[in-house]
Amino acid sequence: MSDLSTKTAFNKENAPELLGQLLRVLKSQGMDDSIAAIKRCGLTRKLNDEWMDDTRNRQKRKRDRRASASRVAAAYTAAKVYSLRDFQRKAADVDKAIGAAYMEALGLKGMWDTFEAIPSKQEPLYDGNMKTMNGLRDAQILSGDVYIALKRYR
């Protein structure tokens, strides 16, 4: 029972602390030659130096991430002044994206059209795809109108 009271907890993720624990155990067991060999090769100094460099680097990366996050947040909170050209580009992007989505839906329809007859289980899916295509067609007409209106806007 007395052995339990003399045990001390240590951080197993901290290499210098682990090495210190090893040295304490070796000393308590009277293994002075092993201690001398560890110290002679400079392991304690090398480990401590590398550990401190790594800790400093981790802290620097953490500071850099925080600074970067605050810069990004500041960029989002700053009110951007949009030009007509920005609106025209975005309208063109929307029109192009809806057109691409329509073409993908058309490609899916084309795959079903290769069947001699659409399987009864897939008929609701085919109908859903047709509704999607109709919705995308309507959206493309509207987005095209917005794009043309912005293009002509002066």
Image (cartoon, helix red, strand yellow):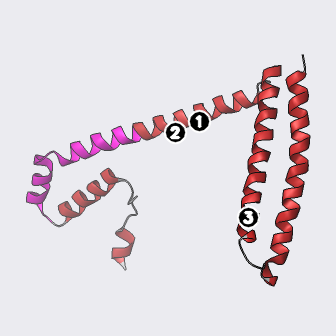
Which is more N-terminal, label 3 or label 2?
A: 2
Residue drawn at the location 78% of the way across and 79% of the way down: 117
Give the residue pinned by disc 2: 62
Kindly identify which numbered label has been placed on residue 110.
3
Kindly identify which numbered label has been placed on residue 86.
none
- Percent x, y of residue 52: 34, 40
Left or right: residue 112 compared with residue 33: right
Magenta segment range?
30-56
Left or right: residue 132 compared with residue 37: right
Q: Are marks 3 and 1 in contact (CB under 8 Å)?
A: no
Judged by depth in the image, the label closer to the viewer, 3 or 1, is 3
Q: Are marks 2 and 1 in contact (CB under 8 Å)?
A: yes
Q: Is residue 31 magenta?
A: yes
How packed mark 2 is, by other alpha carbons closer than 10 Å (few <14, some 14-19, many 20 or more), is few
Left or right: residue 70 compared with residue 112: left
Circle 2: residue type: Lys
Give the residue pinned by disc 1: 66
Circle 1: residue type: Arg
Q: Looking at the image, which is closer to me, 108 or 31? A: 108
Label 2, secondary structure: give it: helix
27 in relation to 5, above or below: above
